[in-house]
Image: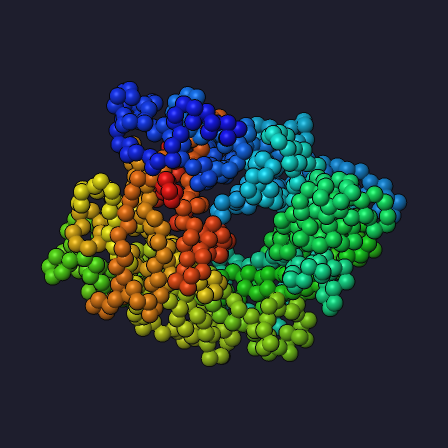
Amino acid sequence: MRAAAFLAAALVGACSTARPKEQDRTCVDEDDCLEGQICSNNICYDNVLPPYEAIALDVRTEGLTAAPFRVEIRGEDKALVEVVDRPPNRYYVDRTEVRDRLLLSILETQYSDLEAGEKSDEPVAATLELQQASRLGRAPFTVPSLTFPPVVDGTAPADEQWLVKSWPRYAPGDVDGDLPLYVRLTYQDDPPEAEPRWERGIVARQLMRKKLETAGDHKFKITSVRECHRKILGNIRFPEGPLTAEPALDPAAMVTINMRHAGRADDGDPNTPICDPAPAGETPATCSVETIVNPAYPTCSSSIYCPEPYGCYAPVDGGEKHCGCRFDSECPKGQVCNIERQQCALDLTDRPAIKPVTALPVDDAAVAASVYTYCDDDPTADRTMEFIVSATPDPRLGLPRLNYRVVLTFLVGDLMGSTPLGRVCLPTWERARTVTPQLVGEPVTLRGDGDGAWTCCDTACLNEATPPAKPDEECRIKAEISAVGTFAPSDPSLWEAAACMPLSGADENGAVRVTYPSTCPPDSDTCSIPLSPGVAGGSGQTYSLRVEPPVGSLFRSTTLDLTVTADGTNETPIELERRVLLRGKVTQEGCQEGACPRAEVLAERVIRGEDPNTLLGPYFYSARTIPGAPGDYNYVIPVNPGLYLVTALPTVTTKNNAIGPAPIVVVDLREGSPALVEEDGVWVADIDELVLSAGSVYTLELNDFDSSSRVVPLDVTTWWGLADPDGEPLDLNAPGTCQVSEGCQIRRVRSGSSPVRLPQDQIIRFVARAAAGE
């Protein structure tokens, strides 16, 4: 269809690969526009379609009256077509082409006689969360708190037991259009008066839609087995003695217990699948093929007739060949191969196993929950499974958040009883003290000199027309505070005698790494963190504080060793080093110096050689250019030392123009980099001009999308070829380049976080970087 549209464009003489002309005018008719432009809705549009390959849109609907919906559109998608038979020439996406409807029914198989196999399927109440990863390297699309049975008008369950939800749809062959769609089900327990009373855990499923050429409805009957929900019972234990109860805390402190599936790590050997039923010295992974809803394993004569990535195999017990798997690589993303059944199963690693529960921080406080054992294929068999149990004490107690590894065996003969979980052990530490580091620093002159100097503690002063009347002599710094420490039992023999569950991830000395997060109130001038001095009578507990001043602060993020003692913590002011000042000038083609509109400069940290788990933030910085700034630079961004991507974006205005973003450049601001020069004790890097030039003007019609829809355009192509100083290529779309789990934020092409709003005519317009050769 796209090829036909291009042919039509060529026939009418509208197709060109030339860079779009400047558009800076409104119009009444074509006489008001430049050559090659048309007048539509009183705006001059280039009658040119720029390259479709560069299109990448995150379209979200989150209005008060519209149900949440999100679709990510790429230029190569089959749903994206070109309109060249009526002005303006534009790309076009119809919502009906990118939306499926999911019809979900939640059923539970309930056995009246397990041994005889007498059973029935009954609807069961549950809360659902749907999740699908982004195909553009952004945060996943998650819709929580869906309820089954569905509710009509907020009053009663619908007569038809289907929960209906719109979901993004991509055509077969669209890039990353088949990313896994997960559903997490949190089932309601039976009412207290029920006899017998079943309590239920959390169940994970993956929904497999048919790869249809058109959008449509997809029905899923999601089933589980009541008898697979099994109770577990453990308790809290303080092997070193009880915690002090005074002074009483209000509200009472609790310990939150959670549990997730441990899974098995992939050893990288394709001949040893994760679902090996008899791994040497390990607990077999839980590999239930029933976790995949509506899988398709058609008959076959050869693997070439199977949909990717399946192979073609004869059943173990003989019979006709079917598409399936013998290796994990022959399963779709997020799945592993159950080699005994030659079918794929959801990889349960790190997926939640129970509803979080709380317990009092006292000896023998009960920890009771229910876990789903994934016994769907054979509820009459015993099950052995491995889990990670986490204990998160109330921060006011100052106790470490600990993880434990446990292997549980669920016996079918004890169906209504409780499987022993074990003991969740915690140390006997003194109550947390509130630690408020006194962070100070020396102001920095950011602009000017003498009486006309902007000498400040952060870059906010640069927005003022005149320098501070009374410059600060010392800066009081507000920074996000968190802590990291190590924990090991002070007397391991006491923990062993108490039959404590073993700590997960302990090193050869029995120590584990523990994090202590803290939230800083936005209305506070300082940030604090509760930390314990450790065991009573000890020499104190040592922590590594993570100090991370916000974007705009002139002071460097750092780690500080701190010992918290019972008689108080040293509150001597801590002087922070200054950040590197990234400076430069943003210019604009065709604009006289001093008369250009303000631009936004972005800088994003590139992960190179650092441990993402310990790398200090912020990771993404932005600043506006300084109005009327004379001299060699018109922006200043204080950043932590590191390797950065830098660009500039024009500010979003209603003016119709074609000025696009500056190219993305790589800047080495690591310590020792030749780009750094010391000025008055501060490291400074002046980089080349960032030039805003004419870009590619994209016009798209999003037909039938809700008026609350917002569009975030991304640059996923023009930076190809960027490399770090060592010549290693940088993939800005890939998680791990800038962000651990997402692509780089600097790919956005609009200033601020402002998405494109969908106007009444449903035609949006934005300016992207011009591709090479345009």
Q: Nearer the viewer, residue 384 or 526?
A: 384
Query: What residue appears at the point 56 percent right and 32 percent down from the top-left corner?
Result: 99
Number of numbered callouts drawn? 0
Query: Does residue 629 sit above or below 121 in this rendering?
Result: below
Residue 188 appears in the rendering: no
Residue 297 appears in the rendering: yes
Q: Position of residue 394 (x, y in %)?
A: 52, 60
Q: Nearer the viewer, residue 503 or 587?
A: 587
Q: In the shown orientation, is residue 699 left or right of residue 110?
A: left
Using the rendered view, name the quadrant where residue 608 is placed.
bottom left
Query: What residue appears at the point 34 percent right and 59 percent down from the top-left corner?
Result: 667
Q: Nearer the viewer, residue 283 or 172?
A: 172
Q: Position of residue 599 (x, y in %)?
A: 27, 45
Using the rendered view, name the quadrant where residue 321 is placed.
top right
Query: Does residue 101 sit above or below 308 in this rendering?
Result: above
Q: Position of residue 297 (x, y in %)?
A: 74, 42
Query: What residue appears at the point 32 percent right and 27 percent down from the top-left corner?
Result: 36
Q: In the shown orientation, is residue 758 left or right of residue 99?
A: left
- In the displayed orientation, state which residue is furthest to the right: 116
Q: In the shown orientation, is residue 301 left or right of residue 6?
A: right
